[in-house]
Image (spheres, rainbow, N blue to C red):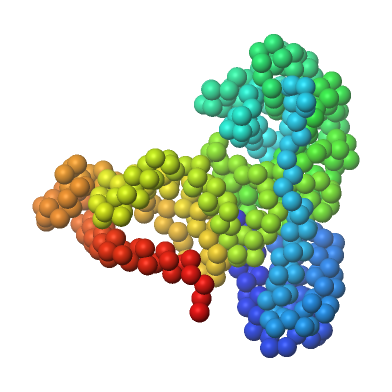
Amino acid sequence: MFESLSQKLELVFKKLRGEGKITEANVAENLREVRRVLLDADVNYKVAKQFIDDVQKRALGQEVLNSITPGQQIVKIIFDEMVKLLGESRAEIRTSQTPPTVVLIAGLQGSGKTTFAAKLARYLRSKGSNPLLVAADVHRPAAIDQLIMLGKQLEIPVYTERGQSAVKIAADSINHARQNVRDTVIIDTAGRLHVDEEMMQEVASIKDSTKPHEILFVVDAMTGQDAVNTAKAFHDRLNFDGVVLTKLDGDSRGGAALSIRAVVQTPIKFIGIGEKLDALEPFYPDRIASRILGMGDIVTLVEKAQEQFDGEKASKLEEKLRKSQLTLEDFLEQLREVKKMGPLSQVLEMLPGMNKLPSDVQVDEGALVRIEAMIQSMTPEERVRPSIINGSRRRRIALGSGTTVQEVNRLLKQFEEMQRMMKRLSKGGMRRAMQGMRSPAR
């Protein structure tokens, strides 16, 4: 996400931080480079110009000129203005005091509306809601069946009426929700390959008949400026409440995310970061700005970890670490917990400074799979006492896991080194390390 944009901005920031003295000339020069990077990322021209003007106005003020580290101060200003550009704060979905809350999903065909509807239902259920999905896309042959299939995967009911109009299905679904104690109705509507009057009229009629509390416009982030133009056309007709950017995991430029909110003056509420039904994140402007500027996103990383890691298991693991009793079985269990957090590349990009790595460095997603296969090919005794794994056992493990003896050797050596480190920490080192982290620097 934002890989190319982040790496290019880091080069500009490196130059800025190295400036011994900030002048109007070198501020203008560096900000021209920032503007070029933004335009390369497909950010709307007017949005990029206004952003640079706002940054320059603040950068030439007294708060920077009197700063001990003016270069870093300008980077902080760029961060602040980017947060402002993206919307300043998290925008929640509006809910009705009298259930059900009606959420209308609109957008072009192929933008990922149907999958997003299911993701949203899963997300809202995790927050305590009891959602109902509504298949109101009667034009695309597979749309109804797709939503039914997704609903079965999530164990969330899907309302549909074969052979009826989209407007009638949407209207009837609200009564169905009331009768079946469903407090949220999520209506998936039809899309087209382009904005046309027939589609706009149908979705406008659904809006009139259902009086939705929230209208979300779903747009494919990969379409760049077209996404912004389409959003404006839909907003002029529907006056939607929020934007959802899908397929952001495949968008290395990020221009749509930076432009769309400024153009339609409507908050981005969710981002899709993968095809799986849990690959949906609420949109936090400060966290996304932090990712774009290479500062990482530790808050989201911690939240993901808290969602996936079992508290009781974590306590048992901590106890084993303290007693230097970590086994390969424990290691395998933690590996599986990390995999639940999403693709390794997405987890790593939340760490500060990852944008400083060379662009040709690739994350080996298959490495975790191979490690898991090797440990699974071991006997229970071998996982607890890896010291008994001799040459013949290593060949058997390699054959059983589809790896090489060298990879098995590497895994065992790394695990042995980790055990030695745990032993050192357990002899008072861990306590001293923790105290050192809490103690102020002298």
Where, quadrant-wise, is the N terminus in this rendering?
A: bottom right
In the rendered structure, the answer to whether residue 257 lies left or right of residue 156 reads: right
Q: Which residue is drawn at 26% across and 55% down?
A: 324
Q: Residue at x 68, y 50 (%)?
A: 284
Please count the marks in the image.
Answer: 0
Q: Position of residue 338 (x, y in %)?
A: 43, 48
Q: Position of residue 68 (x, y in %)?
A: 70, 83
Q: In this view, does 25 lie above or below 330?
A: below
Q: Which of 382 and 166 is in front in this view?
A: 382
Q: Residue at x 55, y 64 (%)?
A: 352
Is residue 345 shown to the viewer in this render? yes
Q: Where is residue 28 in the image (x, y as percent from the top left)?
A: 80, 80
In the rendered structure, the answer to whether residue 158 lies left or right of residue 409 reads: right
Q: Is residue 119 above or below residue 130?
A: below
Is residue 135 shown to the viewer in this render? no
Q: In this view, does 186 lie above or below 252?
A: above
Q: Which residue is drawn at 50% across and 53% down?
A: 347
Q: Which residue lies furthest to the right in this view?
A: 236
Q: Where is residue 242 in the image (x, y as percent from the top left)?
A: 77, 41
In the rendered structure, the answer to whether residue 47 lies left or right of residue 320 reads: right
Picture quadrant where residue 190 is located: top right
